[in-house]
Structures are given as structure tokens and as C-alpha cells.
Amino acid sequence: MQNQESERLYERARNVIPGGIPGIRAPENFVRGVYPILLAEGRGGRIQDVDGNEFVDLLLGYGPIILGHGESAVDRAAHERAQQGFCMNLPSPLIIELAERLAALLPSAEQSLFFKTGSDATSAAIRIARAHTGRDLVLRCGYHGWHDWCLEADPGVPRRARQEVWSFAYNDTTQLEDLLKRHAGSVAAIIVTPIGHEFDRQIDEPLPDFLPSVRALADEHDVVLIFDEVRSGFRVHLGGAQALYGVQPDLTALGKAMANGYPVTAVTGRRSVMMSATRTFMSSTYFPSSMEMAAALATLKVLEEESVVDVLANRGGKLRAELAAIIDETALPATLSPYPSMPFLYFDPELASGQAARRDRFYGNLAEAGVFAHPRHHGFLCQRHDDRDLEQVLDAVRRVARHK
Ligand SMILES: Cc1ncc(COP(=O)(O)O)c(C=O)c1O
């Protein structure tokens, strides 16, 4: 695999962008020297890098691309809206249409507000919960974005910001209960990803009583319950993980798959809690932009018309069964994600020694075989992956799994 153009551009980037490629997309987060550093284009379920190497895309922009790259119905809707003017003084009626669509899809979505990023949405949900309860403390579980309140210990984040936020472990209701007791009367919100999908961990399903217990504890302590469905929304069920597991939060943060890559996110929830948003301030020049809302409405239409959640679950189920057989045959020390539309071959450090090196060889070889998957982050499937794409993935995994 040739990477000269990637490396050449990376050199240029380092001169004008701190670190060259910032954040989780930095080359060190993949397998340095093997993965491309910059991508040129995407079509359907495939991407091409700046050197002309082609890959089946199993990362899909970290989740937003649920239909496929360059999905014409979505791009057309966005383009038409852009040509009519999309960044204007007042919102367009599409904002009402989109809020109504969410109300029809998610059982808890009586009212909605729209934002640009997932971090906006989770931070806005926290702001609404604090305004609603008049309290400050937040109990959190999962990744909720890059804003001060939910970062661990990075330079640049004031210690004070973290003093208002306590973390609890996924599926650990005892820890949550202890925190609620210890801070009784001070907790505004519990925010949790209903599916456990931390970076560099295998995905966890909720234990049968986890989400109902979190709901019951929130009620008992009169705390706003927020589900962070930025990743699970529209992917595990059209109504989100809350519909899949039958537990209703008070507020939900949505993003990613809602608009097939266009930047629009939402906080949605019970009217009685959402109305507290009118007593605080959340605003951006770009929040009402209608181009992304047109893209969201077009995406939701395709999701419904093509039963995308079911298609991905079926296709992912077959892929998962084949991957399980390969793991058995080759004794590959990896585990599989329980969610078929979010595939992940995870090299668990507890399964074998030298796992990090083995994982990097495996994923590096996979990239050489034309499959772009993240070594430490679960993957995604999209509607436009076809049989040829998935056959290529299986052939590559079959070959690569045998290399020790
Ligand atoms: C569960 C969850 N919440 C929030 C976020 C933050 O979203 P964004 O990166 O769009 O700010 C992410 C992003 O990966 C996420 O997975």
C-alpha cells in the first residue's frame, strides 16, 4: 500500500495545524505507517485515500454515515435547501417538521431543540436539567463529548468544572445509588449512554435490570434522567436504545446517524423538563440552519422506507456469525460486539499477553487488505454496504487472522 501522498500532506499539515491531524483522527490512533492519514472521497460503503487506495469503510465517520457516503436523496435535499438560503435570520418551518418527526419516532420526544454537535447536545441537556432542578451536580457514565464538564483530567480543563461531576461505571447501579445517597438533594442529572461503548473496550449490553434501576433511582431522588443516544440513536432501533429496552428517559441527546453526516443534533424529551430550556440561554448563529435539517428529514425518510435498522441487524448478524466461525477456527484472541450493526473485533488484554502488538498487526494487515476499521473503536455498518464489501471484509479477516 502506497502512503506517500498521505505522508507528504501530513508534513504540510504539521506546519499549519497543531499536531498535524488533531484529536482521535491523529495517525497515532490507528497503526502508524500503515493506515492512510488523509482521505479523498467516499461512495456508498467505500472510501478512497489521497494515494488512491480503496477501502471498505467500517468506521463511517465514527457513526454518522448510516446510509452511505454520497447518499443522493440526502445530498439533494440539503443542496436544494442550500440554494434557497439556509442560514437566515429566523428558522425555517423545517425545524417544526423535524421536531414533529422526532416526536413520532421516539416515545419520550415531546419537544426538541436543535444543535450542531453531539457535545452541544449533551451539554445542553445538562444545562436544561440544572435549570429544571436548580441543582448543579451531575452523575455521568460514558463518553459525552469534549466539553469541560465531561472531560477527565486534561490540561485546559479547570479542576472546578470536574468538581460538579461524578462518574459511575456502566451496569453498576450500586455505585450510582451510593453517589445519589452521598449527594442527596444536590444532583441535577444522571446522564448515561444506554449502551456501554467506551473507547478501547468491547461494547457492553445493559444488564436486564440496569436501565430500569437507573430510571427508578432517578425518580426516587427526583433527578433528571438523560440518555446520551448520540451513537445509539436511529441505529439499534428507530426509536433509539430507549425503545429497544423499553425505558424512557426525561431527556435524550441525539446526533450522528440522524442526518447521514450533516451536522445537526438534538435534545429531545418530556415537555415538563424541556420547558426549562426557556429559562436559560443556549444559542448559536448556526443552530437554526435549515440545510442540515433538510438532510435529517431526508435521512429519517430513507431509514423508515428501507427499514434500515432491520437490514443492518440482519446483515450484521450474518457477518457476526461468520466472524465468530473465523475466531473459532483460527483461535484469534478477540471478542465480538453484541450489536450486529456495530461490529468490533476487540483484542481484550485479558484474553492473551502481547495483545496490543497482535491487535496492531491484525488491523494493519486488514488495512493493507482494503478494510478500514479502527483498532480500538467499534465499527459501523451502513445501508449501502453490499455483498461484495462484506465478502471482502470476511476474506480479509480470514487471511489476516492466521498471522500470529
Ligand atoms: C455517546 C456520545 N455522546 C456524545 C458524543 C459527542 O459528539 P460530537 O463528537 O459530535 O461532539 C459522542 C461522539 O462520539 C458520543 O459517541
Image: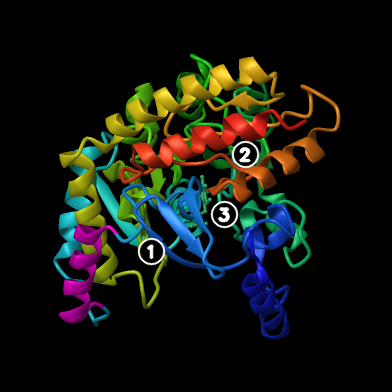
Measuring from the top left, give residue 182's x and y in whole percent.
69, 31
Nearer the observer, 7 or 29 = 7
| Magenta span contains residue 306 | no
Residue 76 in the figure: left or right of residue 146: left
Residue most extreme to the right: 353
Q: Residue at x 54, y 61 (%)?
A: 53
Give neighbour class at mark 2: few <14, some 14-19, many 20+ (Cα, 10 Å): some
Q: In this figure, which residue is indicated by the disc labeled 1?
A: 263
Nearer the observer, 321 or 186 = 321
Give the main secondary structure, helix, strand or loop, of the magenta stretch. Answer: helix
Q: Which stretch did the figure color magenta?
A: 71-86
How much space separates mark 3 and mark 2, taking CA atoms? 12 Å
For residue 89, what is the image quadrant?
bottom left
How much space separates mark 1 and mark 3, taking CA atoms? 15 Å
Name which residue type carries label 2: Glu
State which quarter of the image contains the C terminus.
Answer: top right
Name which residue type carries label 3: Gly
The response on whether ligand 1 sits within 8 Å of label 3 is: yes
How much space separates mark 1 and mark 2, taking CA atoms? 22 Å
SS assignment at label 1: loop
Q: In this figure, which residue is indicated by the disc labeled 2?
A: 198
SS assignment at label 2: loop
**Which badge, 3 or 2, is on the more N-terminal residue?**
3
SS assignment at label 3: loop
Mark closer to the observer (3, 2): 2
Q: In this figure, which residue is indicated by the disc labeled 3?
A: 145
**Which badge, 1 or 2, is on the more N-terminal residue?**
2
| Magenta span contains residue 76 | yes
Q: Residue at x 69, y 24 (%)?
A: 332
Mark closer to the observer (1, 3): 1
The response on whether ligand 1 sits within 8 Å of label 1 is: yes
